[in-house]
Image (cartoon, grey):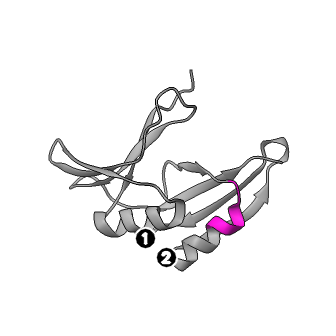
């Protein structure tokens, strides 16, 4: 089993964060209130590889460019970075080859978080 099963990305404005991730990746979110925090849950595909998570708004959630870095899988990093820019985000680390592991990049989302991208080598 892979070690990570769930993640949370802090948000100041949950509606703005949902709109950003929907526009960039096409994700549909479900909303929940969990332990007094507002959550927008990323889709979960049962028995699929990878983890799921949520955009999270609450007193203990502070957007940041430091700390743990979550990577989203994409088939085309350049196209994804263009979508990020069109939604007000910015590229922090351009598409870079990482040998047999493919390519990575990093961007700043609508809330000020540093988020990674990964694309396999084709």
Mark 2 is surrounded, within 10 Å at the Cα level, by few (under 14), some (14 to 19) or many (20 or more) other residues, namely: some
Residue 122: x, y in percent?
Answer: 83, 48
Q: Residue at x 71, y 60 (%)?
A: 76
Q: Does residue 61 appear to the left or right of 72 in the view shown?
A: left
Q: Residue at x 78, y 48 (%)?
A: 102
Q: Does residue 69 appear to the left or right of 19 in the view shown?
A: right
Q: Which residues are magenta?
A: 75-80
Asked if the residues shown at circle 1 and circle 2 are in contact, with their CB atoms under 8 angstroms apart, the answer is yes
Q: In this orientation, which residue lies closer to the viewer: 49 or 58?
A: 49
Residue 105: x, y in percent?
Answer: 67, 60
Residue topped by disc 1: 110
Seen as rendered, the residue at the extreme top is 1
Q: Is residue 42 a member of the stretch shown in magenta? A: no
Please identify the quadrant where the N terminus is shown: top right
Q: Say the numbered circle drawn on residue 93.
A: none
Q: Does residue 96 appear to the left or right of 42 in the view shown?
A: right
């Amino acid at each position: 089993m892979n070690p990570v099963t769930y993640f949370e990305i802090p948000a100041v404005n949950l509606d703005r964060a949902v709109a950003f991730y929907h526009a960039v990746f096409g994700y549909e979110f479900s909303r929940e209130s969990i332990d007094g925090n507002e959550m927008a849950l990323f889709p979960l595909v049962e028995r699929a590889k990878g983890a799921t998570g949520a955009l999270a708004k609450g007193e203990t959630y502070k957007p940041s460019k430091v700390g743990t870095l979550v990577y989203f899988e994409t088939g085309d990093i350049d196209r994804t970075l263009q979508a990020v820019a069109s939604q007000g985000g910015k590229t922090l680390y351009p598409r870079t080859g990482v040998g047999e592991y493919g390519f990575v990049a990093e961007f700043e989302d609508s809330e000020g978080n540093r988020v990674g991208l990964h694309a396999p080598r084709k």
